[in-house]
Amino acid sequence: MEAVRLPFESPTDKIMFHIYHNSYPTYHTHIDFWEFMFVSEGSIVHKINGQSRTLSKNTLCVIRPADKHCMIQSPQTSSLHFNLAIRSEYLKSIFAGFGLELYDKLQKDDFIEYNVSPNIAELLVKYSDNILCADSANTKIQAMTLYLMPVLQEICSHYLINKGIKRQYCYCTNELIQLMNDPVSLTLGVSELAKKCGYSYSHVNRVFTRDMGITPTDYLKKKKLNYAQELILHSDMSMSEIAFKIGYSGYSHFSDFFKSMTSFTPVEWVNNLRNL
């Protein structure tokens, strides 16, 4: 069957949200939209680009603009899944705002599916309720943008942890990446992390940069930023507490670091995000 493009209805043409019970059998593509589909209950057969894949509860699936897909419910079963659709240019701008280079990487994978943690699943269900209960167009857009945050967190974790450690990297690089992927290590500097791995700073700096194409210092800064952004959005911590979590003694130094990475202070960044 020839793919068809489906229209969306939303207060904005940048981001949309739908909830589906069971099948959506029309084979389609969205041309200029990405879809982030999350299975909240049951399981469903996802037909994408000529192949069939069963998506079970708590599975997050990324559908790119050119992907052709539909959802078929198996007999004697049922499902509930959420679809957040976002225009390509808007998604690029969000990645850029986070300092992430994921857009091209997502384009290259054959299938993009993740089994999310119970905490992420709980957030997605909670935020979907916020979208449905929003009483104005602006509030609905804010709620959809907030829903997107744990989705991006899951994708970032996958690429930084699962795809960041490759067999061709030397043991030193792999060990350092594993340490920097642990939030507990974010209060340490590269020199201290190198010592924990049993190597000198100069050796770690040379080998890590060769393997990763980025210095360990810059990689650690990105990890600190990503973790700080996660805490700002999904915790009740004060800015000073978040600063301490990533190795800064007070808000002032933390704010200077955050602005050097994003061009915004933490307060400006979260306020801009809420106003999208």
Image (cartoon, rainbow, N blue to C red):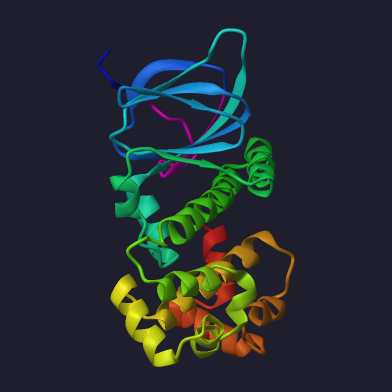
Task: Give the percent coordinates (x, y) of residue 12.
Answer: 45, 42
Which quarter of the rendering shows the N terminus? top left
Q: Position of residue 140 (x, y in %)?
A: 59, 43
Residue plotted at (37% across, 58% down): 93
- Does residue 212 appear left or right of residue 2 in this picture? right
Q: Nearer the viewer, residue 110 or 229?
A: 110
State the residue at coordinates (57%, 59%).
274
Identity of the residue drawn at 48% across and 60% down? 161
Task: Report the residue at 38% width, 51% height from top.
Answer: 90
Foreground residue among 42 and 66: 42
Instruction: Say if 232 sits above or below 188 in the image.
Output: above
Q: Is residue 33 above or below residue 238?
A: above
Residue 54: image x %, image y %? 49, 25
In the rendered image, which quarter is residue 165 located in? bottom left
**Total marks placed:** 0
Q: Which residues are magenta?
A: 5-20
Relative horizontal placement of residue 209, taking residue 129 as reference (left or right): left
| Residue that lies at the very extreme toward the top in this rendered image | 75
The verdict on residue 7 being magenta is yes
Q: Is residue 213 in view from this perspective?
A: no
